[in-house]
Amino acid sequence: MTAKPGPRNLITDVPGLRVGQAQDDTVKTGVSVLLGDAPFTCGVHVMGGAPGTRETDLLAPDKTVEQVDALVLSGGSAFGLDAASGVADGLRAMGRGFAVGDQRVPIVPGAIIFDLLNGGDKDWPDNPYKRLGQEALAAASDNIALGSHGAGTGATTATLKGGIGSASIMLPSGHTVGALVIVNALGSATVGESPHFWAAPFEQSDEFGGLGPARTYPDLTTPPTKLGQHANTTIGIVATDAALTKPQCTRLATAAHDGYARALVPSHTPMDGDLIFAAATGARALTEPLSETLMLGHAAATCMARAIARGVHAATAAEGDTLPTWKDKFG
């Protein structure tokens, strides 16, 4: 079996996972939720200097809770952390959550991007993110709209509009790996003023234009950034059907950060809150743990790089945008 994308080329190629999205186009923001048919093992790794998170401490390998019910990626900076509360309320109504006596406590880690300076109307009378979280949960399905949807609605990079991206790979071992990412980077996903993506060497089947690598590269001593706006952070999820422990999930999330470095220049900066969750459904055992976990990490990094490019490539224009889309500038 040759490694190739899954049938959807989405994180939902991992059996048992769905993604729901909701957005407010006036505010230019939204929420994306990864939901499992059953609780899944989870880890996290933070590489950026300015993260905004909920319930990430319990994902450390030495903490008690082994599995979570959902993961939330949201716009809104600190206001967006309220999206996970909406998801938790919805899960509790479904009877989902960690059993404590006769109570159910849904475990819903989340992370946010800063999208408050993207041209949308942020003068809301009430924080909209709890409602958006509930709406995203209710919309969970196998299909994912890429680009300017969900938490990627108002995302930007240094030079172009960002967005939500996803990709998958099916490995010779039989395991599936997928990535989901909100591209809101301080840096750029494309090379200089060209339409070529930094992630081009990892592209599968012309999934983000098929232009290949750039032929010439700019001086990278001072690459373009949006440092003056402080409006950054790329957050993502890698997932697999492999049976992994919490420490192995943490290692998978760590390896997946290579995808950020391959697809965004610069990445992991002091003003980015770059973070990756790793989710494992446990449906397929490891037969050769050492070699298979190595390849899972490599696949997670390459899927993440591809997902980043796909998110920027799929972005669509909207009234009030502060940056062009890739398609408007190069398409």
Image: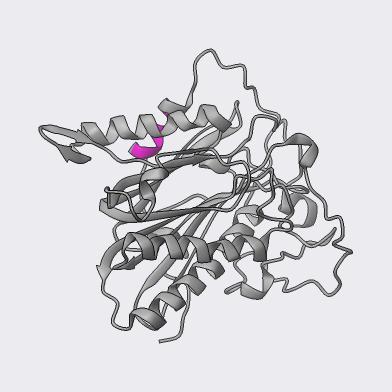
Q: Quadrant of residue 271?
A: top right
Please tell me whether residue 129 is drawn above or below residue 221 in the rendered image. above
- The answer to whether residue 62 is left or right of residue 168 is left
Q: Position of residue 295 (x, y in %)?
A: 45, 78
Return the residue found at the far bottom: 1
Magenta stretch, main secondary structure class: helix
Please tell me whether residue 180 is drawn above or below residue 88 in the rendered image. below
- The answer to whether residue 185 is left or right of residue 130 is right
Of 233 and 209, nearer the camera is 233
Q: Where is residue 132 in the image (x, y as percent from the top left)?
A: 44, 30
Return the residue found at the far left: 102
Q: Position of residue 149 (x, y in %)?
A: 54, 42
Q: Looking at the image, what colour scheme do you see? A: one colour
Q: In which quarter of the image is residue 245?
A: bottom left
Return the residue found at the far front: 62
Of 48 and 181, nearer the camera is 48
Magenta part of the chain = 131-137
What residue lies at 36% left-to-right and 63% top-to-bottom?
Answer: 14
